[in-house]
Image (cartoon, grey):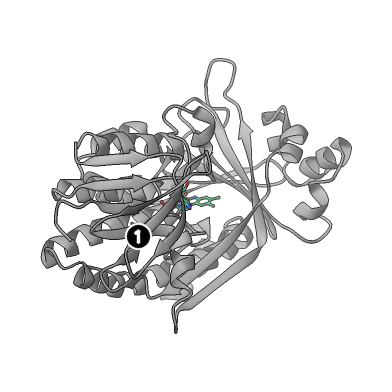
């Protein structure tokens, strides 16, 4: 191994592209292998799993350390609180802070990912290989086999491998064959589907732009985050089972779907002109919490981001935690200099307890958002309970 050999990064998602900025800033050569086409040339590929995301302080700090703060804030829409929509059309605003100084930000996933790749590529030591799908990893010899669209495969090798290939990580799958490897995955009975509130006739936002909108209806919940073009991305979190679950609604006719939305979410119906068409045609996806241990094997491979800790989205912290991984990883790498084994060991020990904690908080917030935020006495009672 020489220091000129590249670090092999698997996956150019949010975590992989930010990590690449950090590694390159340390003078390392980096090769990134990504199964998708370059989303900067292909607007359809940019869609990913959710169109916009809530970016908060931890994520912003990690982005700031690579000089990206100004750019990311120019792309973001501040959400200063939650606006609750009740069935009778009443709106209730709950600010995230008394003075309005603390807020979270709505940001486009695709745009953020593209800009992070472009930022990392400003360093000549960085090279991306798109449409290179990782199909096998030889942990002992630190070799990765990638497959091209033609079906042809090639083997790549570097000084170490860092896997940021997401919740269904091939790298983690390989590690699971090791003796005494711990792994758990737990699906929620709730799934999600995204819908779109288009901008108004003059490109304006049709509901408050600076809020995270929530329609809490017990086991049914919808949220909406603003986009810069005047639209909102709406996410329906419904159960799979039951009379009002996705398994039934995905097959329902227009009249049944319209009746369902008019009954449960009446103020949304006029905002989404293609509601029934989109509901039937947009995919329904599942929500999973994944935990595993260890995250690394000697100095050969380490998992970061969703590959090591996928969480459900109800705290809006999966990406933020993945960005914080990059920040912590960078600090430990600087402290440990060339010893990848020590870097990986220290990194996983520092991060595991934090990512387990946010996984639990995210699951708990699922129940708070859907059941309690619409209850006006809840925040007051919560304060009392904590005293
Ligand atoms: P990913 O973003 O999944 O990136 C993995 C990359 O690896 C992808 O580019 C993929 O194409 C590539 N890849 C996968 N397999 C291979 C392979 N075999 N070979 C090569 N490349 C491969 N987080 C927040 O902080 N705030 C939010 O508001 C928020 N909202 C969310 C809403 C929903 C509905 C969901 C599902 C998640 C949400 N998250 C949110 C979580 C966030 O999306 C993830 O935590 C984040 O995307 C993790 O980044 P990652 O780079 O680790 O994984």
The residue at the point 54 percent across, 31 percent down is: 44
Judge whether residue 54 can be spotted in this image. Answer: yes
Image: 255 above or below 10: above
**For mark 1, does the 10 Å Cα neighbourhood hold few (<14), some (14 to 19), or many (20 or more) residues?**
some
Does 343 sit left or right of 190 as displayed? Answer: left
User: Along the horizontal axis of the image, is 314 left or right of 165?
Assistant: right
Number of numbered discs present? 1
Work out whether 147 lies above or below 227: below
Q: Is residue 284 above or below residue 349?
A: above
* Picture quarter with the N terminus: bottom left
Give me the residue at 55% from left, 29% from top.
Answer: 231
Q: Residue at x 85, y 44 (%)?
A: 252
Instruction: Give residue 222's position: percent from left, percent from top.
Output: 63, 48
- Outermost residue toward the top? 202
Image location (x, y in percent) of residue 385: 48, 75
Q: Is residue 58 among the parts visible in the rendering?
A: no
> Residue 34 appears in which quarter of the rendering?
top left
Judged left or right of residue 75, residue 1 is left
Of 174 and 226, the residue lying toward us: 174
Residue labelled 1 has its Cβ within 8 Å of some atom of ligand 1: no
Quadrant location of the C terminus? bottom left
| Nearer to the camera, 70 or 67 | 67
Q: Secondary structure at mark 1?
A: strand
Using the image as rendered, state which of residue 347 and residue 376 is in the foreground: 347
User: Residue under circle 1?
Assistant: 143
- 265 over 75 or under it: above or below: below
- Of residue 85 and residue 232, the one placed in the foreground of this image is 232
Residue 289 image point, x, y percent: 53, 66
């Amino acid at each position: 191994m020489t220091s000129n050999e590249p670090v092999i990064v698997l996956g150019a998602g949010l975590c992989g592209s930010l990590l690449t900025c950090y590694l390159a800033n340390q003078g390392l050569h980096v090769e990134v292998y990504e199964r998708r086409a370059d989303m900067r040339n292909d607007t359809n590929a940019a869609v990913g799993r959710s169109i916009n995301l809530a970016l908060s302080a931890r994520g912003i700090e990690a982005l700031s350390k690579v000089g990206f703060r100004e750019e990311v804030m120019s792309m973001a829409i501040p959400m200063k609180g939650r606006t609750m929509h009740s069935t009778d059309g009443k709106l209730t605003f709950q600010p995230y802070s008394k003075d309005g100084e603390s807020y979270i930000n709505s940001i486009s996933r695709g745009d953020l990912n593209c800009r992070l790749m472009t930022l990392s590529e400003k360093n000549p030591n960085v090279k991306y290989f798109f449409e290179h799908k990782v199909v096998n990893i030889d942990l002992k010899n630190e070799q990765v086999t990638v497959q091209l669209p033609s079906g042809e495969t090639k083997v790549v090798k570097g000084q170490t491998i860092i896997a940021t290939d997401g919740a269904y990580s091939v790298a983690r799958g390989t590690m699971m064959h090791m003796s005494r490897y711990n792994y758990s995955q737990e699906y929620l009975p709730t799934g999600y589907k995204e819908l779109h509130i288009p901008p108004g006739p003059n490109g304006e936002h049709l509901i408050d732009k600076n809020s995270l909108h929530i329609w809490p209806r017990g086991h049914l919940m919808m949220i909406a985050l603003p986009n810069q073009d005047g639209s909102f991305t709406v996410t329906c979190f419904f159960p799979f089972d039951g009379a009002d679950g996705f398994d039934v609604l995905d097959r329902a006719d227009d009249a049944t779907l319209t009746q369902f939305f008019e009954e449960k979410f009446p103020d949304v119906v006029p905002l989404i002109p293609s509601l029934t068409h989109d509901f039937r045609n947009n995919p329904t996806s599942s929500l999973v919490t994944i935990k595993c241990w260890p995250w690394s094997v000697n100095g050969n491979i380490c998992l970061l981001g969703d590959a090591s800790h996928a969480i459900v989205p109800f705290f809006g912290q999966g990406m933020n935690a993945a960005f914080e991984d990059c920040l912590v990883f960078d600090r430990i790498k600087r402290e440990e200099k060339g010893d990848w084994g020590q870097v990986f060991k220290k990194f996983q020990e520092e991060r595991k307890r934090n990512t387990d904690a946010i996984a639990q908080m995210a699951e708990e917030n699922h129940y708070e958002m859907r059941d309690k935020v619409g209850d006006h006495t809840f925040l007051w009672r919560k304060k009392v309970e904590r005293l």
